[in-house]
Image: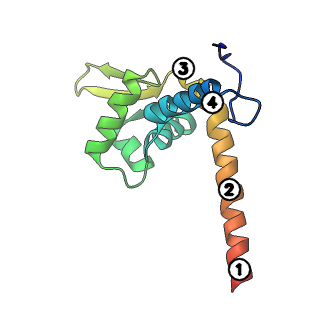
Amino acid sequence: MTELKKEETISCNAKHTPDECNRGIMALEDTLYVIGGKWKLKIINALRTGGSSRFNQLQQTVTGISARILSKELKELELNGFVKRKVYTDTPVVVIYEITPYSDTLETLLNEMIKWGTTHKDKIRKEYKKEL
C-alpha cells in the first residue's frame, strides 16, 4: 500500500489506485466533518477578520446564527483546536473567543473558497442574464 504524502492531492483519476482514491475521499470526509456545515467557516472567518470577540459580538457578526448553534459550534471548534475560549474572572466575568495559530492552516482553503464562490456567483449571474 502506498503512503499518501501530506501535501499530495488526490483527484481520483486514472493515475491513482482505488486505494489512493479511497484515502483521498476519507481525508475529504474527515475535513468536512471537522469544518463542514453552515456555520463553522463563517465563525472562523469572522474571528480571522474581526479579531477576538465576545459571544454577543460574534453572534452579531455571523448573521442569522442562533445563540444555541453558535455555542455548539464554538465548542466543536475549540475541541478541534481552531478556537480558544478565554475567561476573565473580573466583575462581570468576560468570555473572549479567539482563533488559534492552528486555524492559520485553513487560510489558503478559506481564501480559495472565497475566490471560487465569487467566480461561481458571477458565472451563474451571467448565464441567468443570457437566458432572459
Q: Judge left or right: residue 34 versus residue 110.
A: left
User: Going from the N terminus, do you reach mark 1 or mark 3 first?
Assistant: 3
Q: Are marks 4 and 1 in contact (CB under 8 Å)?
A: no
Q: Earlier in the sequence, mark 2 or mark 4?
A: 4
What's the residue type where badge 4 is placed?
Cys
Quadrant in which residue 125 is drawn? bottom right
The residue drawn where x is 57% and y is 38% is: 49
Viewer-nearest of labels 3 and 4?
A: 4
Residue sitting at x 41%, y 29%: 77
Residue wearing tag 4: 21
* Whether residue 55 is visible: yes
* Residue corresponding to mark 2: 118
Spot the residue most to the bottom.
132
State whether residue 129 is above or below residue 26. below
Image position of 7 with respect to 33: above or below: above
Of the numbered discs 2 and 3, the one sitting upstream in the chain is 3
| Picture coordinates of residue 78, whole percent (x, y) | 39, 24
